[in-house]
Image (tube, coloured by chain):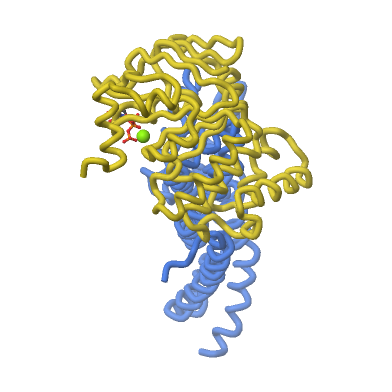
Chain colours: A blue, B yellow
């Protein structure tokens, strides 16, 4: 048994370093950017043609929160190649597995995080806006200098939740032929007939990665809460 | 000079401002008093476009802003550049140190360089008696200290007018005194101010001009001496209630 672990653990770890971690990080960074823009669009007070953009943003969040991630992965990887549009995509939209994975994960986590960011911006007391307005700041400056720095602190725990969920959800990438950690553990289990050991082992790796994130969250919370007087 | 004419503002079916016209002389302190819910906050906030009356005119020197029309952002920013608001709840930026709170406007809005802004911020903090608090965060301040930082923050913008909406109502008398002393000093330096307050003793000392508001209307508008010697029974009653004369 020890032998099984010592021989398969490096393979699983390698898959983690090659796929799970990079896909998670890249998807989350892109997802955060999408989320920030989506939140700002939805909170914008602009009228006119802009309401169409707002409607699109709302639709996007609704769509990705209302459908299973696994289904989204299948549509993007297996389905889009059949989306043949004359002149634009005559051969459908074909993507490498990793690209399809990152695209789907980014859009999915972006939808959730946009709600987190939107709520955190709304949670900042209105007096902060008023004080900044009275100083003569424009809305973009107020957001950048006054509101977002405070909203970041509020949104850190839920954003960390999303990141941790994303790391675990990358195991679904196995279903679109990405040989990430979970896929590797399945392949090994199919050879050595030790599913309990193999799946427990890969679970330990996921737990390890997520623990690092939890620790990072704790650290960031401490840094961003410098200005808050501790309760007690 | 700043002047408004025929301001009207309704909240639902409540007329918060009912055809209010008033002038706020330069280099003087105008104190607005009146019972709770009379429209004092609505009036002073309208002067900084934090509230938008449905109709009326806002005159700033030779600028005439028609409030019944759409007012563009540039005009609003222009007015806000020349005026500052101090709030009852201070509204300091909690994620910035005291010094940074004072520097933020000059750097972001006036485009001053950091060194210059810091230098002046230190001077202003010294002026409000908080030189040693420059590097702490607002949560570590008492209410009186926080309000003095807010005053320093507004002074840093070199506004033509400072509007203060019940700046000391959240403070106990000792802390209130700290703030009132600073305001008196600023008034003596001929900073144009408009102050909403319930503190009649302070009003009497600091005001050049008094405005008494009730039910969204102005019942008195005149020199401070006249206000405290009026024989208008409503105002006499109000003053004696506010000063606990007939308790
Ligand atoms: N945002 C709002 N929504 C609805 N009604 C409002 C709003 N702001 C003010 N009012 C109403 O308008 C009237 C005037 O309010 P305002 O805050 O200007 O009074 P005030 O003189 O400042 O009172 P106080 O001394 O209690 O601060 C009140 O009847 C109040 O209930
Ligand atoms: Mg008020």
Q: Quadrant of the C terminus of chain A?
A: bottom left
- Say whether residue B225 is visible: yes
Is the residue A83 above or below the residue B147 in the image? above
Is the residue B70 above or below the residue B176 in the image? above
Q: Determine the residue positioned at 65% across, 56% down.
A: B131
User: Which quadrant contains ligand 2?
Assistant: top left
Q: Determine the residue positioned at 61% across, 10% down.
A: B62
Q: Determine the residue positioned at 60% across, 19% down.
A: B74
x and y, in percent, of residue A6 in the image? 59, 85
Residue B12 vs residue A200: left or right?
A: left
Q: Determine the residue positioned at 70% across, 39% down.
A: B107
Of residues A115 and A124, the one nearer the viewer is A124
Q: Kindly indicate the quadrant of the structure image that contains residue A142.
A: top right
x and y, in percent, of residue B90 in the image? 48, 45
- Say whether residue A104 is visible: no
Of residues A86 and A165, the one nearer the viewer is A165
């Amino acid at each position: 048994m020890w032998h099984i672990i010592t021989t398969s653990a490096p393979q699983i770890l390698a898959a983690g370093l090659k796929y799970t971690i990079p896909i998670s990080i890249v998807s989350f960074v892109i997802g955060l950017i999408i989320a920030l823009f989506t939140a700002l669009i939805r909170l914008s007070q602009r009228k006119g043609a802009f309401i169409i953009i707002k409607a699109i943003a709302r639709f996007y969040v609704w769509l990705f929160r209302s459908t299973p991630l696994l289904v989204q992965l299948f549509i993007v990887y297996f389905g889009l190649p059949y989306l043949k549009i004359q002149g634009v995509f005559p051969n459908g939209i074909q993507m490498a597995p990793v690209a399809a994975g990152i695209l789907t994960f980014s859009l999915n986590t972006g939808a959730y995080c946009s709600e987190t960011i939107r709520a955190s911006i709304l949670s900042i007391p209105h007096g902060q806006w008023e004080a900044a307005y009275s100083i003569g700041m424009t809305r973009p400056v107020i957001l950048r200098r006054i509101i977002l720095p405070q909203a970041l602190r509020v949104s850190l725990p839920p954003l960390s939740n999303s990141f941790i969920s994303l790391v675990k959800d990358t195991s679904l990438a196995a279903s679109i032929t990405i040989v990430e950690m979970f896929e590797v553990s399945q392949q090994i289990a199919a050879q050595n007939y030790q599913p309990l050991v193999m799946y427990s082992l890969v679970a330990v790796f996921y737990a390890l990665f997520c623990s690092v994130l939890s620790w990072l969250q704790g650290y960031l919370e401490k840094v961003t809460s410098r200005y808050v007087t501790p309760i007690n | 000079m700043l002047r408004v004419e025929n301001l009207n503002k309704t909240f639902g079916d409540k007329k918060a401002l009912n055809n209010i016209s008033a002038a706020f002389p330069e280099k003087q302190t105008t104190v607005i008093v009146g019972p709770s819910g009379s429209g004092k906050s609505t009036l002073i906030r309208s002067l900084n476009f934090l509230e938008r009356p449905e109709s009326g005119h806002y005159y700033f020197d030779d600028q005439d802003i028609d409030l019944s029309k759409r007012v563009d952002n540039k005009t609003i920013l222009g007015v806000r550049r020349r005026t500052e608001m101090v709030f009852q709840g201070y509204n300091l930026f909690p994620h910035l140190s005291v010094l940074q709170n004072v520097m933020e406007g000059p750097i972001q809005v006036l485009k001053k360089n950091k060194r210059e802004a810091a230098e002046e911020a230190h001077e202003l903090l010294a002026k409000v008696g908080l030189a040693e608090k420059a590097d702490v965060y607002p949560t570590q301040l008492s209410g009186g200290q926080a309000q003095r930082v807010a005053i320093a923050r507004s002074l840093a913008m070199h506004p033509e007018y400072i509007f203060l909406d019940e700046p000391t109502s959240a403070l106990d008398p000792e802390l209130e005194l700290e703030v009132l002393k600073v305001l008196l000093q600023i008034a003596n330096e001929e900073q144009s101010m408009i102050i909403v307050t319930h503190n009649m003793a302070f009003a009497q000392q600091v005001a050049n001009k008094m405005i008494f508001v009730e039910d969204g209307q102005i019942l008195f508008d005149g020199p401070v001496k006249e206000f405290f010697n009026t024989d208008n029974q409503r105002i006499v009653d109000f003053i004696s209630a506010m000063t606990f004369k007939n308790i």
